[in-house]
Amino acid sequence: MAITIQSNGVALPSPTEIETGDEIIWSANTGRSTTGLMVGDVVAEKKTLTIRWGVLTAAEYDGLRSALGTGFRPFTLAVDGSAVTITAYRSALTGTLLGTFGGVTYVRDAAVTIVQQ
């Protein structure tokens, strides 16, 4: 299975895991009525992607941070040639610094969540 992810047209490193979700957005007046019944209207369904990487070099991690950017931007997920593009923003990019070995610094368990606008 071939999976690619782009942020604003820039290819991201191949992830080790992608978790997808569909969030249902309810109207502002959603809540419980005086009889205890839930009332409200679904106004949209939005995608979320949680992307995780295994071990990256510090240079790859910095490149990833740069490619993810800030603010709203197009993110494209392609699986076996079938692509979906959403306008989205990202959460904080997290990772664990492993240390420097042979002059190269490594980061593991990098992760970010992409949330559709």
Image (tube, helix red, strand yellow):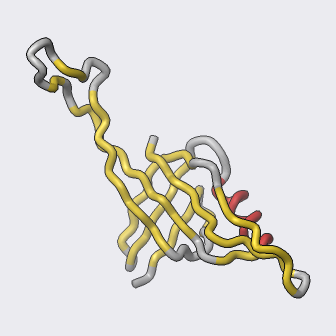
Quadrant position of the N terminus in the picture: bottom left
How many badges with numbers are in the image? 0
Residue 61, placed above or below residue 48: below
Percent across and percent down for residue 109 are 62, 69
Q: Is residue 82 left or right of residue 76?
A: left
Quadrant position of the C terminus in the picture: top left
Nearer to us in this view, 71 or 83? 71
Percent across and percent down for residue 2 are 44, 82
Residue most toward the bottom?
A: 102
- Residue in the picture at 22% in, 33% down: 42
Q: Is residue 94 left or right of residue 46?
A: right
Residue 110, placed above or below residue 117: below
Nearer to us in this view, 33 or 29? 33
Percent across and percent down for residue 77 are 45, 65
Residue most toward the left?
A: 35
Residue 28: quarter of image: top left
- Residue in the picture at 52% in, 67% down: 5
Nearer to us in this view, 18 or 72? 18
- Residue in the picture at 66% in, 77% down: 55
Percent across and percent down for residue 72 are 56, 43
Q: Is residue 92 left or right of residue 102?
A: left
Residue most toward the right?
A: 103
- Residue in the picture at 28% in, 25% down: 27
Residue 68: quarter of image: bottom right
